[in-house]
Amino acid sequence: MLYIFVINGRSDKRDTIDAELDKQLAGAQFKYDVYHTTGVGDGIRYVRIYCDLHPDEEVCFVACGGSGTVNEVASGIVGFPNKSMAIMAYEGTNDFIKCYPGRDFRSLDGILDGETVKVDIIRANDNYSLNVINVGFDAMVAHQANSMIIDGVEQNVAYRKSVVRSILGHRVNHIRVKADGQMLNRRTLLLCNIANGRWCGGQFMCAPRAVVDDGLIDVCLLKTCSLFSFLRILKPYERGEHLDNRFCRRHLKYCRARHIRLSSNRLIYLCLDGEITASTQFDIDILPKAITLVLPPAK
């Protein structure tokens, strides 16, 4: 088995990850390689090309970074049965691994001694999400924050500004959502989570009933509502209590489905595990047990 460590190559993350990984790789007795990504999407490109050139080789790609790096590695190995992935959760938010509490995702030994499991992945047009796709308010927060960060604004400041702007200007999103042929809304929504995992944004349990290997997508749509109602929903939503909260349920549509269609006369911004893409229509499907994941042993 070859292990390839795919490291987030951003200058503010690479040195820290390299230092942590070098300590654990000292004296390694197994075959490995290291690749540093060069920008958004480069991890997908690298993994896919490697898989194309080595279709029969057993390789475990180890995503070293946050949710974006995990997304790129998972997206790259889709369709390659001899390829698996592991996660070393360095430098950033890793929402997907919260589905596996009590496991050490920062340990190399945990990967080498781990068990393999099959998990689902969501496909949205030509893009993939291992964890959660955000639509509407959440996606606009991420889109605007990313734009500010590119312009040199510090990350925390960018997200705070983006939240304020989105509260003022993006609580009404003209997007229609159809789940397995059933229309969930007429014209607008505040936000919609299309989930395989349970958490998003580092702290919000947006899909508390989601299961990563059940072959179903959890869909939670929050209808357009007043600012007062939205703020009242926010805390139960953060704690994962919104599906059972009587007030929240008046403003929600929840279902499980295998196919989702999003459509609009305007651009729809999707946030897929932190990565942004846009189109006027998305066809979204679940690919059951399409990813082989290496899990560290339970403590």
Image (tube, rainbow, N blue to C red):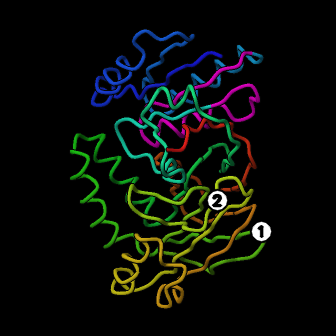
Q: Label 2 amino acid?
A: Val
Nearer to the camera, 228 or 120: 120
Residue lying at 48% horizontally and 45% vertically, measured from the top left: 275
Q: Residue 180 carries which label?
A: 1
Residue under label 2, please give it.
211
Nearer to the camera, 81 or 225: 81
Q: Which of marks 2 and 1 is nearer the N terminus?
A: 1
- Spot occupied by residue 143 in the image (x, y as percentages of width and height): 40, 53
Residue lying at 46% horizontally and 38% vertically, measured from the top left: 105
- Spot occupied by residue 106 in the image (x, y as percentages of width and height): 42, 34
Q: Does the magenta stretch include residue 242?
A: no
65 vs 200: above or below: above
Element at label 1: loop
- Spot occupied by residue 281 in the image (x, y as percentages of width and height): 65, 58
**Quarter of the image holding residue 4?**
top right
Q: Label 1 amino acid?
A: Asp
Distance between the alpha carbons at the discs numbered 2 and 1: 18 Å
Residue lying at 48% horizontally and 59% vertically, measured from the top left: 199
Nearer to the camera, 84 or 170: 84
The crowd level at tag 2 (other Cα within 10 Å; few <14, some 14-19, many 20+) is some
Q: Give the range drawn in magenta.
A: 57-84
**Quarter of the image holding residue 179?**
bottom right
The crowd level at tag 1 (other Cα within 10 Å; few <14, some 14-19, many 20+) is some
Quadrant containing the N terminus is top right
Labels 2, 1: front one: 2
92 vs 84: above or below: below
**Quarter of the image holding residue 24?**
top left
